[in-house]
Each structure stands twice: as structure tokens, then as C-alpha cells.
Image (cartoon, grey):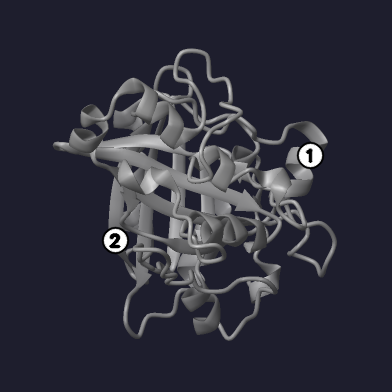
Amino acid sequence: MQTGILEPVPAHARYLSFSLRPGADPRAALRGLAAAADGRATVVGLGATLVAELSARVPGLRPFPPLVGAGVELPATPAALWCWLRGEEPGELYLRGAELARALGDAFLPQEAFDAFRHLGGRDLTGYEDGTENPVDDAALRAGFFEGGPAGLAGSSFVAVQRWQHDFAAIAAMSPAARDLAIGRRLADNAEIEDAPASAHVRRTAQEDFTPEAFTLRRSMPWVKGEQGGLMFASFGASFDAFEAQLRRMIGADDGTRDAIFGMSRPVSGAYHWCPPVAAGRLDLRLIGL
């Protein structure tokens, strides 16, 4: 497994996504990346388009679904390659990212780059704690990583990545009580509000309320660029099914009730990636023929 997925979020991070250069053969670049990425300081995900270009198949990997719900349309912004650089200092991450981009340059084109950071010990920029009900220990392993399967699939993970952009003016216009009810938790003590409305984010995404239960391993981090900011949401799972079940409920696809979080923030990107396991200190790409 890529151990950076299991560890707490770092002090700083840099998210990079790449498209495949037209006509390029990505094999040499991927072999170099497999040797350079340790799965801890650099977590790597491969998109469905890249796997298809290699005439390979990863069971469970599929494109991000462009879902439409109750007044909500979720964007799908696929990328061939996704890298989550983790560290303690943003300058070092920038230099690592630049070196990575140069190494991939013959086969991949930079698509997007965003810096992120840990805020107040793990809070979103709205002030609310993020990932409160993340599974831990053995439950985290079961929720976040694929067990069994062919060589090169066991120990891998499927990550859903969305960049959420907050509407800080709308958030500031809400009363503290209204914000608490939209989230379903009290900002003051992070306690769940028992009589929160059905639209509250906590009620929409309660992982134990799904059949089967929809637990994922969330490793999200706040981002800021210029005057804009929000949450870089990353949900790791043994498959995409649990994340997708939560997302469908959030947009009211099943019952018409939209998550109140959409009054505070909106996703501006969405992509699915497969995070291969690590073997002998390098990414294990046997499943895709490398």
C-alpha cells in the first residue's frame, strides 16, 4: 500500500494533475515515477484514460460520474495522472513538484497544481473539523484499501478527488446557529446535533446509514489561491462505491433532499484515480504491464 494514504494529513501538500501528451508513450515515464515515488511523501494515482492508453485493465477503475441532482450539477474533470506531494514546507514541495513535472515532461502535460495545508489541527476553512468519523486501525485498512485480487491489485486504493470552492460571503452571512445546522455539528465542541434537519451534511453522509455501510478514508486539506479557497477533498476506498453512494445522497438523487453544504461551497472539479500498491520500495505497476 501507499502508506501516505493511511497517515494523518501533513502540514503542507501540493496536488498535481497531468494529462497525457498526444501521441506519447507513457511507459518510460511511469517506470521512472514508480522508482521515484515512495507512496508516503508522494502518493500517486492513475486515471482511467491512462490505463486504457496502456491497453490494460484495473478492475473497479472507472471515470468520475458527472452527476446531476436537486439543483446541483457535479463537474467531471478527468486527469491521466494525479500526484499528492506531502511534506512540512511549501517551498520544498514546490521544488519537488517542479522536478517531477520535468521528469514526466516527455509523456505528460501539467494540468493543474494546487497547494494545501493543515489548518488548526485538521479543520476546514469554515472552522469545522474535517473527517471526524474517519475509520481507524483495521477499519481504516478495510475501508481504504483493496484486499485480495490479482497481483498488483491487493493493497491498492481508489481515490475520489474533488476541489471544493467555498462561498465565504454566503458563509459570513449565515448566523452561527444556521451554519451549525447546515453542517449538523456544533462548531464550539464538534458535537453532532441530534435534531439537525435532513439536509444537514452530517445526516446526508452518515456512513453507517447506508446499505452496505459506506465508510471511506478521507484525507482532505484546505487550499487557498489568491482570494479563493476551499477544501481539496480526497476520499480513499477499496472501491468507488461508498463515495458514490454518499455523493448521490448529497445531491438528493434518491430522495430530492439536497445537502445544505451546497449553500456554503461547491465542487469545481472531480476525478477518479487508482493508487497502485508499493512493493520492494517502489510502485507496483504489474497490473498495467509495467
Q: What residue does disc 2 label?
A: 110
Q: Is residue 87 left or right of residue 159?
A: left
Residues packed near mark 2 inside 10 Å, few (<14), some (14 to 19) or many (20 plus): some
Type of amino acid at the residue the image marks with label 2: Pro
Q: CA distance from mark 1 to mark 2?
A: 35 Å
Q: Is residue 60 left or right of residue 212?
A: left
Q: What residue lies at 69% left-to-right and 56% top-to-bottom?
A: 156
Q: Is residue 148 left or right of residue 61?
A: right
The residue closer to the viewer here, 209 or 213, is 209
**Relative image position of residue 46 (x, y in whole percent):** 52, 65
Q: Secondary structure at mark 1?
A: helix
Q: Tell me, for residue 124, which label it has, or none.
A: none
Q: What residue lies at 44% left-to-right and 54% top-to-bottom?
A: 258
Q: Secondary structure at mark 2?
A: strand
Q: What residue does disc 1 label?
A: 139
The residue closer to the viewer here, 289 or 7, is 7
Of marks 1 and 2, the one in the foreground: 1
Q: Height in image: 96 above or below 24?
A: above
**Relative image position of residue 162 (x, y in whole percent):** 42, 53
Q: What residue lies at 50% left-to-right and 47% top-to-bottom?
A: 234
- Residue 95 shows in the view: no
Type of amino acid at the residue the image marks with label 1: Ala
**Relative image position of residue 94 (x, y in whole percent):** 30, 38
**Relative image position of residue 128 (x, y in whole percent):** 44, 25
Which residue extends farthest left? Answer: 227
- Residue 2 shows in the view: yes
Which residue extends farthest top? Answer: 188
